Amino acid sequence: RKGKEEKVREEISKIDGVKQVHVISRVLSKPAFGGEGLPYNLIVEVEAEDIRTLSRIIMNKVREVDGVTGTMTMVVVPD
């Protein structure tokens, strides 16, 4: 029986622009300004030609997958 994370991983991996999706152990982030933090269960690598395209993939595709309750975006800066 597949867990919820695995089902979400499968759906996200079908999205154009998504290169990799990894299920990770549940991490509780330490927020910079107090609070409890947010739990994360997946790391998703997305490749896009510009920030506008990246935003559309995240906002219109990834966040629409049933089971996704939030996202945090980090952009890799080339050398």
Image (tube, rainbow, N blue to C red):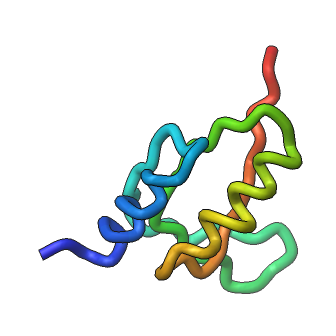
Measured as percent of width and height from the top left, residue 26 is found at 43, 68
What residue is shown at x 63% (from left), y 64% (from top)? Answer: 61
Q: Is residue 36 above or below residue 7?
A: below
Measured as percent of width and height from the top left, residue 57 is found at 70, 55
Measured as percent of width and height from the top left, residue 60 is found at 71, 67
What residue is shown at x 56% (from left), y 46% (from top)? Answer: 16
* Quadrant the N terminus occupies: bottom left
Q: Which of the 4 image quadrants contains residue 75?
A: top right
- Most extreme residue toward the left is 1
**In front of the other: 24 or 50:** 50
Q: Does residue 4 appear left or right of residue 30 in this picture?
A: left
Q: Does residue 18 appear left or right of residue 52 in this picture?
A: left
What residue is shown at x 49% (from left), y 81% (from top)? Answer: 66
Q: Which of the 4 image quadrants contains residue 35?
A: bottom right
Q: Does residue 57 appear left or right of residue 52 in this picture?
A: left
* Quadrant the C terminus occupies: top right
What residue is shown at x 74% (from left), y 66% (from top)? Answer: 59
Q: Does residue 65 appear left or right of residue 11 in this picture?
A: right
**In front of the other: 41 or 27:** 41
Q: Is residue 33 above or below residue 77?
A: below
